[in-house]
Amino acid sequence: MGAGLLALALLGVLLVYAGRILLDLPFYPATEGGYLIQALYGKAMPGHPDLLPGVQGLNNTAFFLIVRATTYVTQDLLVWLRVLGACAYFAGLLLVYRSTRSEAGQSPPLGFLLLALTFPYYRFAFAALPDGWFVGVLGLLVLATGRVYLGRPILHAMAAGALCAVLVSLKPQGLAVAMAVLILALLDVALGRRDVRVFIGRVSVFSTVFLVGGNLILLLGGQPIVSPFAFLFSGPELAAISDRVTTEALEATTRSLAPLISSFLLLAGVPALTGLLRIEMRWRWITARKLGPFRLERQEIAFLFVLTSLIITLVMTAAFGVAEPHRILGRDFEALAPILWLTAAPFIAEFDRDGARWWRSAMGLVVAVGVAGLAICLFSGALALPWDTAALNAFFRPDLSRLDLAPAIPYFALATVAALGAAAAMAFTVWPTQRIWLATFVVLAALATLVDVAWEDSLRPARAALGAELRQADLIVAQRLGGVAVIAQDESMAHQVFLGLRGRPQTVLVGPDATRPAGRLADIDTVVAIGVHPPLQNWKPVFQGKALQVFERASPPHLHVSGGEPLGSDAGSS
């Protein structure tokens, strides 16, 4: 009965996100829209300095290549990007689970795979985002690490260098994975082969393949190579590094780490500490009996690789998010949580079979500490927003000053009860760990989905109106010969209009005062305004809807500017 209810709940959650596949506009316009614009129109944008400079700084070249390749085989770009991203995500988890199979062919209980599949990060995989692809490539790297790291170190270094180059070109957090590979090489010197020659070979081959692969991806994407390390960071990350290395920024980073560490203990503390305990206990056992030098095993290496990647990701997330320390930017580290559960699954199964009461009590305490820390952060002003978090979205607390969403369901209280219930079950029962956390993640997934649906429902009327009016505006703009500009309240709206007009605008101005000075519209004859009422003189309205307005210049158009044509794109069906 209980298993059936869990299955029904999980099926309902998946159906909600599968239903988003057919949306005709990006669901996360600020991020999805930015990626799509750069992928489809990025090559023509540098000649237009007023055209979304934030988008022009994006450097997710591997994902841009995926977007462009998809346009060659289908007209339904958004639909297929969502489908392929979800497939890549689930394939990545399956690859990690396969990596946990022992040399005798035994796999950990299937419940751990179900647990990982239940973890609600798939909500970002069913989107035109690189997140699903990131997990897919990382799953392949974890499998390679578990299978060939010890036996064929140079082969692993080559594979890791190439795959890390792809990961960095998908998301900046790929750099955390690359750093984890180097740290793993150091651990191999200390606790593995203890061979400096192998270490030098690993690092040399990995670094060479990593740099060559990253720059090759830039060349394939038509991006300029201004330095050998140009592929490592996008514009926003470079700004975070160059402009925020101050005492205040370091203090803000420390503050933003508090909710992230608490969330880590809550969602991934059990596999992280269990894996470390198992390694430490095996080391003490070998040392006490003088059985020879301690050497890391295959599964321990895979576990340490994922754990190190997660920890570095936490630090990077806190460092890049200091501009808005009140936001819990859990999305990037949550991608690694189900992978960590899978790599630690054999160790957790061992402790479960032994029935060690002290271990279960310690794991329950870790979860309780994580829940308490997260609650303190939330009541101190931190906010888990639907577009920033996955499972943590279940702990949503309304804050109308930041998000106009006040659902009647007490999500935070229910999620806290579920998490504390998992802590109590770990400490005071002998139930299998995977069953406890499978049930917990199903509950958190259901709550997070309800928050997501409430947020989507609050936006649905405006999205529907915008979609219909964008089609009208697109027809109007297509008949104009002069230059086209977009004036929007924020970049999220600007991205939606730019994509809806199929790349025709040459200028995108953001903010109510964006038209000042007026010279910024000197070569423009048609203006599409959304979310703002710009003070336009000598302009007359052509179309006025609920979501946007279209204006044309009262004087004759500047025929030398071809605004009816979209920006250039090499994509097949863009």
Image (cartoon, rainbow, N blue to C red):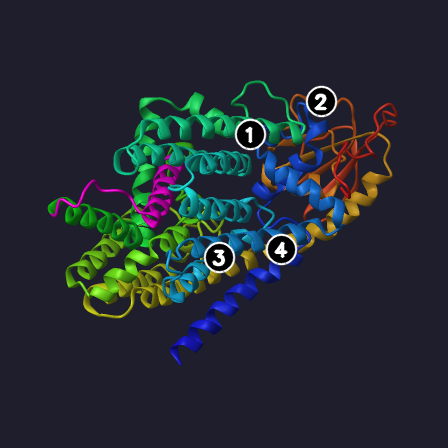
Mark 4 — residue? 83
Mark 2 — residue? 47
Label 4, label 1: how many angstroms apart (C-alpha)?
Answer: 26 Å
Residues packed near mark 2 inside 10 Å, few (<14), some (14 to 19) or many (20 plus): few
Say which label, 3 or 2, has the lower sequence index. 2
- Tell which of 213 and 261 is nearer to you: 213
Mark 1 — residue? 214
Q: Quadrant of the C terminus?
A: top right
Task: Determine if the magenta segment contains residue 153.
Answer: no
The kind of residue tagged 3 is Leu
Magenta extent:
289-317
Above-or-below relation of 420 to 238: below
Which residue in the rendered view is the most extreme toward the left?
Answer: 288
Say which label, 4 or 3, has the lower sequence index. 4
The kind of residue tagged 1 is Gly
Say which label, 1 or 2, has the lower sequence index. 2
Label 4, label 3: how many angstroms apart (C-alpha)?
Answer: 17 Å
Q: Horizontal placement of 44 versus 424: left or right? A: right
The kind of residue tagged 4 is Val
Q: Residue at x 61, y 62 (%)?
A: 19
Numbered disc in front, either 4 or 3: 3
Numbered disc in front, either 4 or 1: 1
